[in-house]
Image: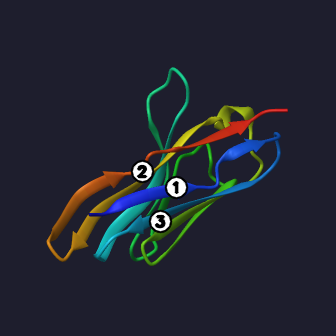
Amino acid sequence: QVQLVESGGGLVQPGGSLRLSCAASGSIFSISLMGWYRQAPGKERELVAVIARGGVTNYADSVKDRFTISNAKNMVYLRMNSLKPEDTAVYYCKAVGIRTADGGYPELWGQGTLVTVSS
């Protein structure tokens, strides 16, 4: 069984930095795309950044030039710089196109990690 586990959230002051990590565990052959989404209180879940297996990335306009997504085998990271209070949200890891020995999964979500930006 494949699971996604996020880590790295927490409380940070405005202007600070955090690094989120997401690890996909299990007998995985490949993952087509991994990324980060976030959901602030009272708002819908939104895309933050995604990265394809080949390295192509896509960012939300609100985080361009501040956040950087990167990946390694079955891992995805989000480096967040110049954090703003409006970045406060639960951040979710997502994996798409997961191939495993017994077939795979179209997509999976992690349980989420809370990022709070406040002074």
Circles 3 and 1 in contact, beta carbons < 8 Å:
no
Secondary structure at badge 2 equals loop
- Please tell me how crowded label 3 is: few (under 14), some (14-19), or many (20+) other residues with Cα within 10 Å: many
Which quadrant would the C terminus be assigned to in this image? top right
User: Considering only order in the chain, which callout, 2 or 1, is on the residue closer to the N terminus?
Assistant: 1
Q: Please give left or right for residue 102 compared with residue 15 in the image.
A: left
Whether 68 is drawn above or below 112: the answer is: below
Q: What distance separates the C-alpha of mark 3 from that of mark 1?
A: 7 Å
Whether 81 is drawn above or below 29: the answer is: above
Residue 118 appears in the figure: yes
Circles 3 and 2 in contact, beta carbons < 8 Å:
no
Task: Place residue 88 in its image quadrant.
Answer: top right
User: Considering only order in the chain, which callout, 1 or 3, is on the residue closer to the N terminus?
Assistant: 1
Secondary structure at badge 1 equals strand
Q: What distance separates the C-alpha of mark 1 from that of mark 2?
A: 6 Å
Residue 80 appears in the figure: no
Q: Please give left or right for residue 25 compared with residue 91 in the image.
A: left
Q: Residue at x 29, y 76 (%)?
A: 27
Residue 113 pos. (x, y %): 56, 45
Q: Residue at x 50, y 66 (%)?
A: 76
**Which amino acid is tagged 2?**
Gly
Circle number at residue 23? 3
- Please tell me how crowded label 2 is: few (under 14), some (14-19), or many (20+) other residues with Cα within 10 Å: some
Label 1 sits on residue: 6
Residue 41 pos. (x, y %): 55, 24
Task: Place residue 77 in its image quadrant.
Answer: bottom right
Label 2 sits on residue: 110
Circles 1 and 2 in contact, beta carbons < 8 Å:
yes
Q: What distance separates the C-alpha of mark 3 from that of mark 2?
A: 9 Å
Residue 94 pos. (x, y %): 39, 54
Q: Please give left or right for residue 26 compared with residue 14 in the image.
A: left
Residue 53 pos. (x, y %): 39, 74
